[in-house]
Image: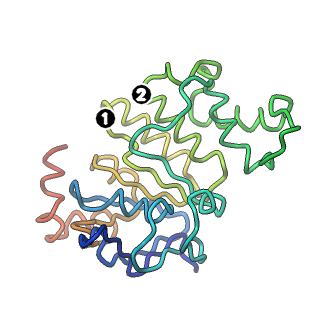
Amino acid sequence: MTSALELINLRKSFGQTEIIRGVDLSIAPGERHAIIGPNGAGKSTLFNLITGRFPQTAGVVELNGQNLAGKAPFEINRLGLSRSFQITNIFPKMTVFENVRCSLLWSRGYQYSFWNLVSNSQELTEAADAILEQINLTSRRNLPAGVLSYAEQRALEIGITIAGGANVIMLDEPTAGMSHSETDYITDLIMKVTEGKTLIMVEHDMGVVFGLADKISVLVYGEIIATGAPEEVRANPRVQEAYLGAAMEAH
């Protein structure tokens, strides 16, 4: 079976400093995979390499068996990979509905058709409303996105991330800065909207990681030191020494 995402000896250097140091990772279709590790381990850099924001220094990134070398982020997105960021990316002055509708345009064939008024498309409206219902924001439909609570803005960004129909979803610290109740809300939402999709997430909250992930990879100083099921990783002495013991104590 072809992996949803395959990393082969992936490396990234900035000048003389090697940040990602030969990462090998295979993620199966439909798997929920968490990447954890201490601050400065290279997790965001790894995400940026996968999504085309940074060119790799060496190695291979494959999405559903296709080599992504040299592809721009928008090209990778159109091949079926979508991501969210640590800092929420929405259009604050547009309504919640308009934010979701914008994210649907390319996948629904609107590309550069300037003569098509999106407001006249019943199919586009229905698709956007279906996503709003999925992310529990129907009641906020006509509000400017900037007035939503922090957790609601993160939910909206997740809705934008899934709207294009990507089968590989990457979430970068989706619950960062949230209260326990907000974290529970977003965790349940992620579980629901990624059903049947491949989920790859960076997350520091170990409760979220162990609640969502089928497999966990631990990245330390640019190298993956362990990959496995949550209980395997939790019991790994090397992981406990390098990261997990301190992380679990913090939560």
The kind of residue on which mark 1 rests is Gly
Left or right of residue 87, residue 28 in this image: right
Q: Quadrant of the C terminus?
A: top left
> In the image shown, does 144 or 236 lie closer to the viewer?
144
Mark 2, Cα crowd under 10 Å, few <14 / some 14-19 / many 20+, is some
The residue at 40%/79% (across/down) is: 58
Tell me which colouring the rendered structure shows.
Answer: rainbow
The residue at 14%/70% (across/down) is: 237
208 vs 134: above or below = below
Residue 23: percent from left, percent from top: 35, 75
Determine contact: label 1, label 2, CB under 8 Å.
Answer: yes
Q: Which residue is mark 2?
A: 150
103 vs 238: above or below = above
Q: Which residue is mark 1?
A: 177
Secondary structure beneath label 1: loop
The residue at 15%/71% (across/down) is: 238
Residue 167: percent from left, percent from top: 61, 59
Residue 245: percent from left, percent from top: 13, 57
Secondary structure beneath label 2: helix
Quick one: which residue is furthest to the front in this view? 15
Q: Where is residue 183, by image quadrant?
A: top left
Residue 135: percent from left, percent from top: 57, 35
169 vs 54: above or below = above
Mark 1, Cα crowd under 10 Å, few <14 / some 14-19 / many 20+, is few
The kind of residue on which mark 2 rests is Tyr
> In the image shown, does 181 or 223 lie closer to the viewer?
223
Give the mark, 1 or 2, whose residue is nearer the N terminus.
Answer: 2
